[in-house]
Image (tube, rainbow, N blue to C red):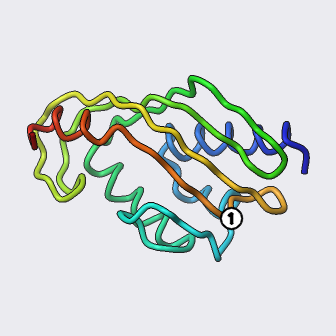
Amino acid sequence: MTAERNKQVIRELYEEVFCGHNLNAVNRFIHEDYIQHNPHAAQGKTGFIEFHKIFFQAIPDARTTINMMVAEGALVFVYSTYTGTHTGDGLLGFSHTGNKVKYDVVDMFRLRDGKLCEHWDVADTKAIFAQIGAI
């Protein structure tokens, strides 16, 4: 797969899953043996789905805007901004607040055969915690 094709896969993932909340589409995007380097999410495709079920329950109007995307070989780096309203429970263990949230994330994906096989992320958790009243 070319770097440009890998970027297209990631764009489709963001549109269908992160913005469209279509967890049924995950099979097209994630390998079964997906490696997750975020300690708040379990390993594998099942871990990805479970994490996002909770996230979409907590922020049902969650949207992601891609600000920048860079790819080199099998790696795709995305700088994005997440927005939504914290109306459901479960976000990092906190009860709903009704507060608007807006925070930045840098995701690093490794793809194999057109699907995600590994992921790292750096999120502005201070912004999240401040906006839901945790700090």
Residue assigned mark 1: 117
Q: Which residue is drawn at 75% across and 57% down?
A: 111
Residue at the extreme right of the image, as rendered: 2
Q: Which residue is drawn at 22% across and 27% down?
A: 100
Residue 94 x, y percent position in the rendering: 14, 53
Residue 5 x, y percent position in the rendering: 85, 42
Q: Which residue is drawn at 31% across and 31% down?
A: 84
Q: In this view, does 73 lie above or below 131?
A: below
Q: In which quarter of the image is the C terminus?
A: top left
Residue 61 position by quadrant? top left
Residue 32 position by quadrant? bottom right
Asked whether, in this view, residue 97 is left or right of residue 129, the answer is left
Residue 128 x, y percent position in the rendering: 25, 38
Residue 85 position by quadrant? top left
Q: Residue at x 32, y 28 (%)?
A: 102
Mark 1 surroundings: few (<14), some (14-19) or many (≥20) residues within 10 A: many
- Identify the element where label 1 is drawn: strand
Q: Is residue 81 above or below residue 39?
A: above
Please count the marks in the image: 1
Q: What's under tag 1, amino acid-wise?
A: Cys
Residue 55 x, y percent position in the rendering: 34, 52
Asked whether, in this view, residue 100 is left or right of residue 38, the answer is left
